[in-house]
Image (cartoon, rainbow, N blue to C red):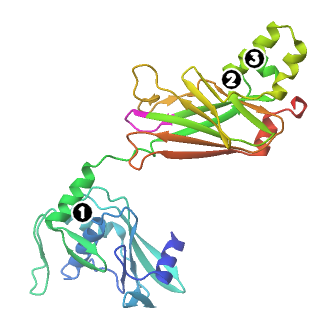
Amino acid sequence: MKETVFNLIENESENTKLDFKSQQYPIDKGNIRKSEFLKDMSAFANLPNKEDKYIIVGIEEKNGIAVGFKSIEKLHDQALYQQFLNQYIEPEINFEYREILYQGHRLAYFRLFNNNNKPYLFKKEYNDNHPKGSHYRIGTGFVRTGTSTRELRRDDFEKIYSERCAKKDRSEDIDFELALGAFESEELRYLGYIKHLQIDINNRSNTSIDLDVEAKVYNIKNKVEACCTQWVEEKLYRNKRDKSMFAYTTYLDKIIPPYSFIDMNVEFENCKAYSKYEITAKKGALTAVRVKQKGALANIFNGQIALIFSQTAELKIELIVRSDDFADGLKIFTYYFSKDDIDEIIDPYDL
């Protein structure tokens, strides 16, 4: 956080998300500048931008640019600011107030973050009871535009409520776990240069989610071949049945995966740059995968991702995930297995 504040001081001028103050906001009773704190905090919290907003204290500015510093003698307590703010503004505004030392100067900063319950409005009337003081009615709110602050208008409220009703992006609700290891099948386990890529999915949210998932295993020429497990098993079975032991023991060294293969709700395609696996929806289902709230699904590709190694090498896997609950369309998750990871899994005598 220190580096962020330093960067704002050195490289930014005042803008919609940044303000410089030469002195702390007063917190003592009867000071007419107390209202400025309520107004500024409301204005920053009501900004539609989801990035953090900063008010840096102890900065002398000219035309919005920091030109000098005014050290703070005694830092006000954040709890006092929070209490004062909560007394007049609702809902509660998330912020922190911290001291920071910069070039020998004792400064401070407000950081406003995760204020997603807009609008932030006065819940009770505020009056300085001073001829030059401020008077704010119940329901008044402010928003920052550029380097100035104005009252919320009707179109601001319409935009706020429109955004609140918009679909939530749930792309952060899920994550995947990838593991590369031996097959349970004795025949495939015995052939130690064939490994199984297992992909599990977790739903961290309290709501179930429907997904379509595609995996791309990027080709590493003459080192790794990808194909469907069942197809490999069928080839092994045929070779063994035909009692062609020479073919049985050497066939997979010369394997050429099929261009396409569909079985067990997994579609496989061998492309030039990568091999692609896609989970197909079961009969009657609109999507391929449903993960329950706070739930997990193991081995979502039904054990069909088989990787055949002639040498150990780094692996790159991309998971392309689509869902109606993703606001920005598909999301790509990228994973790597280093050569060292593969070396730990594969016995060199198997190659």
- Mark 1 or mark 2, earlier in chain: 1
Label 3 neighbourhood size at 10 Å, few (<14), some (14-19), many (20+)? some
Q: Residue tagged by mark 2?
A: 229
Question: Which quadrant of the structure image shows residue 286?
Answer: top left
Tell me the quadrant of the picture where the C terminus can be found.
Answer: top right
Q: Residue tagged by mark 3?
A: 235
Question: Dots 1 and 2: beta carbons under 8 Å?
Answer: no
**Left or right for 6, reference 93:** right
The residue type indicated by label 1 comes to: Asn
- Mark 3 or mark 1, earlier in chain: 1
Q: Is residue 27 visible?
A: yes
**Left or right for 50, reference 267:** left
Task: Report the Cα–Cα distance between label 3 and label 2.
Answer: 10 Å
* Residue 256 horizontal/vertical position (percent): 76, 29
Which residue is depicted at the point 18% across and 80% down? 30
Check residue 204 for magenta coloring: yes
**Left or right for 215, reference 170:** right
Question: Which quadrant of the structure image shows residue 35?
Answer: bottom left
The residue type indicated by label 2 comes to: Thr
Check residue 165 for magenta coloring: no
- Mark 3 or mark 2, earlier in chain: 2
* Residue 199 marker: none
Q: Nearer the viewer, mark 3 or mark 1?
A: 3
Q: Residue tagged by mark 1?
A: 86
Vertical relation: 148 (above or below) 293 = below
Vertical relation: 147 (above or below) 327 = below
Question: Dots 3 and 1: beta carbons under 8 Å?
Answer: no
Vertical relation: 114 (above or below) 305 = below
The mark total stands at 3
Q: Is residue 69 visible?
A: no
Q: Which residues are magenta?
A: 202-210
